[in-house]
Image (cartoon, rainbow, N blue to C red):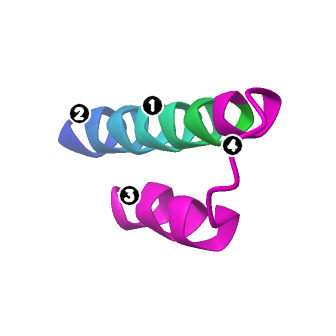
Amino acid sequence: MPALIGVNQACGGIAKGVGGLLMVHSSGARAPSARVLRAALAQV
């Protein structure tokens, strides 16, 4: 089931990226969200 493992890792990467994005926004930091989101998607 290597495909299943790959999907699992991709979902984990997206979740981590979104979590980081929310953390940055809640802390009030002015990070470019598009770049953060693109970095999260690049992990897939």
- From the image, tell me which residue sits under label 1: 12
Dominant SS type (magenta): helix
Percent of width and height locating residue 37: 59, 61
- From the image, tell me which residue sits under label 2: 1
Tell me if mark 4 has few (under 14), some (14-19) or many (20+) residues whose alpha carbon lies within 10 angstroms of its own. Answer: few
Q: Reading the chain from its start, which is encountered first: label 3 or label 1?
A: 1
Q: Residue at x 68, y 43 (%)?
A: 29
Tell me if mark 2 has few (under 14), some (14-19) or many (20+) residues whose alpha carbon lies within 10 angstroms of its own. Answer: few
Percent of width and height locating residue 20: 56, 34
Q: Reading the chain from its start, which is encountered first: label 3 or label 2?
A: 2
Q: Secondary structure at mark 4?
A: loop
Residue depth check, mark 4 versus mark 3: number of the one nearer the observer: 4
* Numbered badge on residue 44: 3
Q: Secondary structure at mark 1?
A: helix
Amino acid type of the residue tagged 3 in the rendering: Val
Residue depth check, mark 4 versus mark 2: number of the one nearer the observer: 4
Asked if 18 appears above or below 23 in the picture, the reply is below
- Are the residues tagged 4 and 3 within 8 Å (C-beta)? no
Q: Is residue 16 left or right of residue 18?
A: left
Q: Between marks 1 and 2, how big is the CA–CA gap? A: 17 Å
- From the image, tell me which residue sits under label 4: 29
Amino acid type of the residue tagged 1 in the rendering: Gly
Q: Reading the chain from its start, which is encountered first: label 4 or label 2?
A: 2
Front position in the image: 20 or 12: 20
Q: Which residues are magenta?
A: 23-44
Q: Between marks 4 and 3, how big is the CA–CA gap? A: 25 Å
Q: Secondary structure at mark 3?
A: loop
Q: Residue at x 40, y 43 (%)?
A: 7
Amino acid type of the residue tagged 4 in the rendering: Ala
